[in-house]
Image (spheres, coloured by chain):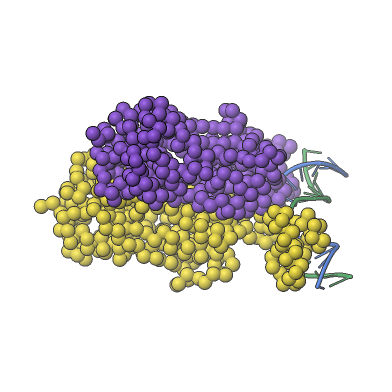
Chain colours: A yellow, B purple, C blue, D green
Amino acid sequence: MRDVAAAAGVSVAAVSLALSGNPRIPTETRDRIAAVAREMGYRPHAGARALRTELTGSLGLVISDVANPFFAELAGEIQRAAAAEGFSTVLCNSDEDARVQDEYLQTLLAGSRVDGVILVPAAAMTAGLEAAGKSKARLVFLDRPVEVSGRGAAARHLAGCPVVRSAAADALAQVADLLTGLGHRRIGIIAPPMATAVGVERTELMITSLTARGVAATDITVAEGDFRQDSGERAVSQLLGAAARPTAIFGADGLMTIGAIKGLRAAGLRIPADVSVVGFDDAPWFDLFDPPLTAVAQPIAGLATAAVRAMIHLVDGSLPALPDAAAATPPCALVRRASCGPAPA
Amino acid sequence: MRDVAAAAGVSVAAVSLALSGNPRIPTETRDRIAAVAREMGYRPHAGARALRTELTGSLGLVISDVANPFFAELAGEIQRAAAAEGFSTVLCNSDEDARVQDEYLQTLLAGSRVDGVILVPAAAMTAGLEAAGKSKARLVFLDRPVEVSGRGAAARHLAGCPVVRSAAADALAQVADLLTGLGHRRIGIIAPPMATAVGVERTELMITSLTARGVAATDITVAEGDFRQDSGERAVSQLLGAAARPTAIFGADGLMTIGAIKGLRAAGLRIPADVSVVGFDDAPWFDLFDPPLTAVAQPIAGLATAAVRAMIHLVDGSLPALPDAAAATPPCALVRRASCGPAPA
DNA sequence: CTGAAAGCGCTTACAG
DNA sequence: CTGAAAGCGCTTACAG
């Protein structure tokens, strides 16, 4: 900055003011300074600026599993949306481990590496979240709400943090329509961990949609997975051994559904002749599967922009708040392919 | 830090020294200070530290396309490897656009946001790369080498930057063995952009392996793609119209291969009865494809650790250099599935 | 209207 | 052996 000032024949203060567009610097001086700065390839030292302004121009993104194509795509879209607003994205992967998540939260927030964190929570409530709440950190919950416990200032802060997630109800109702319409009466659900709010919600939503269409609650079998592919495979063998052996399976997550298909094949079952399959989360290559997989697509770009907008609003209030100020819920859509067929007689 | 110092009854200097493990602070004092700091949830302000030390503890990762599952997985592994070494990862996505890449390079490097950048170059040589070379920035090239032009100090610096990529020769030789062994004599190659070094190399490697096994050079048709799915689909129709219509197709990239399969289906061709397909880049769900896709798997974790190690070596020299000090090339492996069959009569 | 000066939170060379 | 002080590169309240 001193070099730019010298080259432009002004003070460092003038350079700072000019580059931040302060109107007190006459337009032509400003332009001259900007030209010199550009020509010299000058960029302000991010750390120095952060030290002065308490703002880093970076946001943290703590996701629970980058190996999951849904989160990988989501991370990419968030980076893109953040960059469009001039923010850098610091990527972290908690691997569904609350301890790792808390460690990242601490490094990012307490270390002032970022202005706020977009978080896919790995667990219900943790010490790190409590600490983040106590320090009034800017937090946006993504994909999963967090059941806030306690009633102190920290809890109140967390409860007020925006939550961005997709609205699955309509799409799941369509799944129920599709399945019952094809004559399925015994349904298996491979559920996310019931320790997570999303696990409980997505499962209950599916169950309600099904029972509302005449499926007996006792004919719905739930096998709990852990969001990973292997757990889908294990869940399938559990479902196949159930009293009400399902003729259709709903995999409540992309990776678990892939595992389920592998499990079904290993058991020698045909899709959809023996068992129909619907998954939650879509991917561009699902139509290459054998058979092409029917799936619920989440609005990934919508989630990403909503999360970034919510965060930037917390940082500088420049962007309009979310519709209801604390939540954005773009809708999911059912993508019909060929993995669902009539229930076997 | 001042608060920690006050709470521990020492000077801020003592806190700094203690937390950095400086032996001049007696062990028990050090432990006491560390305990107080931990209890108070203290983390040093990253920007302030960066300002003083000229080191950020962050590395930039500029990849060319996060939507590509290969790069998504690679980014995840790099984040993991970096975190294990105490480094944060700033993720950027150039979208194969050299201008975007240069902008990120500038923000990250000139703005001192990171200590160095692991870069998947989007193009042969750019102004941003030249600038990075001139400033002697720490750069590690990933997946693709860069043809450095010029002979100034900047060019010399760039030429000395580590290059981390997989060794494809053996696996491609196996592909050639597989295809020729099945009787294929007319082969189509869907190539990466020939403007990139990787495009030229991967294509030539495949051609040499094929001709070495008796395939006539005139029976090898090359259609150039751009790493994206659509381009694979377009390339297929080009290949199908070729004079020597291929009975087997090698897709030199994961997404382009997926596009190729879609193109083949759209053309009403069966895999592998009419056309065999082998792809470059593997994914855990390729065995769910119809038919399961035979593919060359890159050593993703190996690439990630090699790239991170190379970068950290540049930053502090703490890690042993790469084997030959400027390159790491873990080998690819051919994963045989069912998308290759005997050449049609 | 402009520039000099203070201070953000660290680290480390230096003085005591 | 310990602490005070300087200074990294910015921004902005303040003095001229």
Identified at 32% across, 49% down, the residue is B262
Is B62 located above or below residue B345 in the figure? below
Identified at 78% across, 54% down, the residue is A3
Identified at 60% across, 32% down, the residue is B326
Quarter of the rendering containing residue B176: top left
Name the residue at the top extreme: B213
Residue B306 % position (x, y): 54, 35
| Image-based side of A231 in relation to A239, left or right | right
Identified at 49% across, 38% down, the residue is B200
Can residue B10 be seen in the rendering of this structure? no
| Image-based side of B164 in relation to A225, left or right | right
Is A234 located above or below residue A134 in the figure? above
Number of numbered callouts drawn: 0
| Image-based side of B142 in relation to B127, left or right | left
Residue B59 % position (x, y): 59, 45
Name the residue at the left extreme: A345
Residue B336 % position (x, y): 33, 33
Nearest the viewer among A261 and A211 is A261
Nearest the viewer among B269 and D2 is B269
Can residue A286 be seen in the rendering of this structure? yes
Say which quadrant the N terminus of chain A sits in.
Answer: bottom right
Nearest the viewer among A195 and B281 is B281
| Image-based side of A339 in relation to B286, left or right | left
Residue B108 % position (x, y): 62, 51
